[in-house]
Amino acid sequence: MTLQREKRDYSWGMVVDVDKCTGCQACVLACQAENNVPLNLQDRFERARVMSWIRVERYWEGEFPDVKARFIPIMCQHCENAPCEPVCPVFATYHNNEGLNVQVYNRCVGTRYCANGCPYIVRFFNYWEPVWPEAFRNHLNPDVTVRSRGIMEKCSFCIQRIRRGVRNAEREGRNVVDGEIQTACTQACPTDALVFGNFNDEDSKVSKMKKDDRHYTLLPHLETDPNVVYLAQIDTDRSAGKSHG
Amino acid sequence: MQQRRTIDQIHTNRVLLNGQLDTPKWWAPTVIGLGIIVAIGFFLIGIMVNKGLGVTGLSRPVYWGLFITTFVFWVGISHAGIMISAILRLSQAEWRRPVTRAAELLTVFSLLTALLFPLMHAGRPWRIIYYILPYDFARGIMPNVRSPLIWDPVAISTYLTGSTLFLYIALLPDLGNLRDRTSGWQKAFYTILALGWRGNPRQWKLQTVGGILLSALMLPIFVSVHSIVSWDFAVTPAVEGWHSTIFAPYFVIGAVHSGVSAVVTMMALMRWLWKWEDFIRPEHFDALARLLIVVATGWLAFTFLELIFAVYGLDAPELALRELQIFQWPWNILFITFVFTGYIIPVGMWVQKRVRNNIALMFWSSLFVNIGMWLERFLIIVPGLARKTPFVYTWEAYRPSGLEWFILFWSLAWVTFLMLLFSRFFPLVPLFEQKESQTFGDSIKIGRVRVPAIVREAD
Amino acid sequence: MASEAIHSGAHADAHEGAHEEEHHELPERVDPDVITSELVGTTEANGSGVRTWAWILGILTLVGVVATGVKIVAESGDQAEWGYTAAIVAFLFSAFGGAPLVAIAPTLAKANWVRPVARFAALCSLVSIVCTIWMIPLILNLPMLVVDGARRRSIWFEGPDISPHLWALVGMLTLIICALGLIWAYGLPDFAAMRDHSTGWKQRFGGWMARGWIGSTVQWRTMRMRIGMMGTLYFFTFVFIHFIISTDFAMSLVPGWRDAIFPMYHAISSIQAGLAVTVIGIWAARKYLGLDKYLHLDQFWSIGRLMFAFTLLWGYFFISAFIVFWYGRSGSDKMWIDFLILGPYFWVFIAAVVFIWFTPWWWLIWNRVRRSYNGTAIGAGLILLGVFLDRVRLYVAAWSVPEDRIHERFLTKYPSAVYPDVMDILIMIGAVAATVLLVLLSTRVLPILSVWDVQQFNLLYRPVEYMKTKVSLIGKPD
């Protein structure tokens, strides 16, 4: 019963190679800086209101002393069949024709229903008006809206960068070249665990990686059809498993 | 065997109109006291709108908490009115008569209160009017009709409109009565409201037909309202414990359980405060309690099915949620309280005829039910969010802030306040129903005994 | 006061039969002696071909039993073969098993109209015997709780391997006991009537069953208590068996079907069908046994209203499940819709919805229909057909899922449609015939309308004139 979507030029997506992730949190920081996400100070942690569009979840596996730390970066999965979209009463979140699940801040009234519908818990609510220390005033990214209190926000695949890339390409009368557009997290990732690209382009890096035997998606039984594909951890001790929780 | 009592109409008029014609002494101080609480409540809501929802205890992923629980609770209470007036009217239960007005009133005021909660609970309440009344034609974006949050206001406002009409139609004969017994501005007030009621056969016929038609029309709305509220939760597969097919009837029968219990609470208060011992009698409590036993047991069956089929799939996240909901501190205490106050204590009391005829005990048992039913909603909504999906990394707890608790308390005061204001101007027990039941009551002689009997029209 | 304006308008012998006109005439009162002799007389009546019908039904029953035996012996090990048997057991249990509730619930609520109907409804509980017989092959073919070394999903969780099999049998046997107890407790005064007004073996049987009934105050009080107890017991066993049949014999056979409302849905449509069976029963009694003196429009009208209400409730319960699956769109949600609705039994489903819900809704919504004997009976027939089709689509689909797929998270490949073979048809006809035969035979030892209830109805009811109109005055003893 998935809606048939028309063929489109771009279908943005990401491949996360869990095997390469070291849990360094560089992506988290890069995202925070790029997207004007408010600072997570002590108060936010205490009241469980941390906002980070991408997070690196850490799980311990095994019993001491044979313990392994597992890391998995989780951001908005940009589902084709997104549970957050139909529940929004004001169309503040919807699917655009480039495979992105976009959030329109202006429309949002803050019912937080989308966040309840989201199985990946990657939608964040602004409980307070965001404030930055004086020193940060001039560090805000001018390309990204600063969200006011009372609305939802989430990973946009750095839509400002996508727009700029597509615009540049159009100006030069060509399609976007693979690797031309980088999201903040992929750019910051030191091990190239995160790769961003166009799934519609058969030759793009993400399309090739998606065909890897190790590929899987999160919570497949919900059939949300995410645009973020994970590649499983290669474990020398045991056969490759899906260690996502 | 209950002996049918005869009360003459003059006595009926004098006693049942005592709230309007000579206001009781306790009325003014109580209303002022409640008014202060209500004012503080509105002030706190103002603070919340001004500062942001950070003042609540909500977190991520527990995005819905005490306010939504209280919203569901008040929508549940609002099911009292139609249950009592429409269903019992269509099934011709005689004992409903003195209770109908109070039950309908409870419906209207609790719906008004319920509506406030999702409004104040939104991140930007000043913009929410957009999704109820789409004013913004310029951009060509209408509200998303696929969202249950659109179905909600539609269902609730339909229900509110219907119940208000229902209440008003049933009020007409009594308004005519009051118009004839007052003078000055009061007379003018009642004259306008009574719409020229003179009590001629045509008017009575219209009033009766209108009542029956509205009863029949309101029934589907009655069912739809709480079903839609339940679908707010049930359509979401992401939250374990919400995505259950049983939710709609489960919520409806739970709503009837809590609503009828609230009516019992109110009846006891009315009997004590306005001294209406002649009209609100133990046999009414007895009948309501027997109805409640059936409703409560049906509701328990639904609760049981809900639990059984939650663990039926044996999915780890679902088991983790139930583990939290039933066994972990402090939820285990809430769960035990819920089971005891929602079913075991009250039904254990109601099965005894002695209790059913004791007003004080009925009062307390009905209060228990509503504590239990509030907890039921809380236990459905919050643990489900706190244990969402297998990502244990994001599991969180939720502790409502003091402000949230006060607003829950405020909503109780607010409904009571509205009811008391209403009682100053309109009779809480329908006079004409009372007189009609006197006329319809009769007795027949069988052998040596006289048996109470009821006149039934041949339609 | 009201009583001053009321004059008794009762004329015991001025009876002219009920009227089919649009305007509802109040029924006349009947002489008590006439009631007893006429109703006891129905147990003797052979003129309407009762004997012939009994022979035909008996032969059909026998054929059904033989067909079942042949099918058990020629066992192929494929559980899909038993889908239609499961469907007919579920249908008969739903329809006839639900009928006694029609008697119990309004009796407990002291509704007067139900009195002439209650006996027939109570007799329908004998279906539990038929269901137990045809449940044997089902129990033999139901997969164990542990399949291929792993435990399958069921409501029995960690229970012993044969829990579903055992509890279905225990439940059914309990229901038989409750049914017999209910019929006996409810029929006590009528057994006495048989003792006093009948002849031959029926008189002796009645005398033995009546246990010295003389109608003393104490005996009446005990009887009421017994009816209340047996009624409640029957009700709870009935609900329990719905829970078991719907989950063990349908839901848990389909991996991924997790539907908390299903047992309730099952029970609701069962009450709907029970009302329909009752209507058809009293319609036949009125038409072929000439009991129009006791069965008035009031009974048909009241049951018609209830049937209408339960028809709407069916729609509500179905939508409650459907909207959750349709909106949820997860894998198992889609499976429910794709397999059980849009799947191989799509047209059966459509037909079921049309007959169980849509047509009765738009047929029974008219007061004129509910106020006619034939109109109500037609509505009842539609509902019975619809409930049968609904059971077919659910049970045949569930039984067609191969046992080795049972551990999947949800079905991804759906088994194709299973059509009934000759044996299935013979079994279905036989089971229905057996049920009807049992009820028919039981009306030979107990009047199809309860004598004492009709007498009380008569006592407590007075047509009176009030002002310029005629109203009825109904006594409500506590």
Image: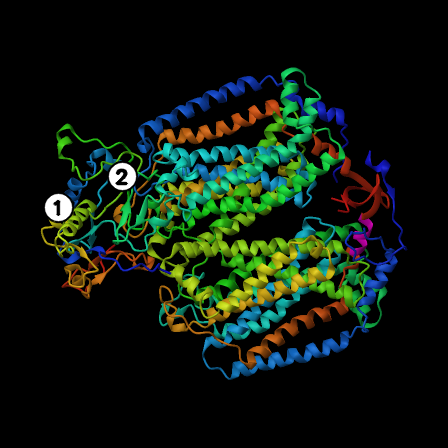
Report x, y in % for residue A160: 19, 44
Label 2: which residue?
A48
On the image, the x and y values in percent for residue A138 come to 13, 32
Quarter of the image where one finds residue A232: bottom left
| A212 with respect to B259 (left or right) | left
Q: Is residue B211 above or below residue C345?
A: above
What residue range appears in magenta? Answer: C454-460
Instruction: State the colouring used for the structure image.
Output: rainbow
Q: What is the three-letter code of the residue carrying label 2?
A: Ala
Closer to the camera in the image, A7 or B1: A7
Residue A5, image quadrant = bottom left
Which mark identifies residue A26?
1
Residue most extreme to the top: B184
Q: Position of residue A108 (x, y in %)?
A: 33, 39
Image quadrant where one finds the N terminus of chain A? bottom left
Magenta-drawn stretch contains B292: no
Identify the element where label 1 is drawn: helix
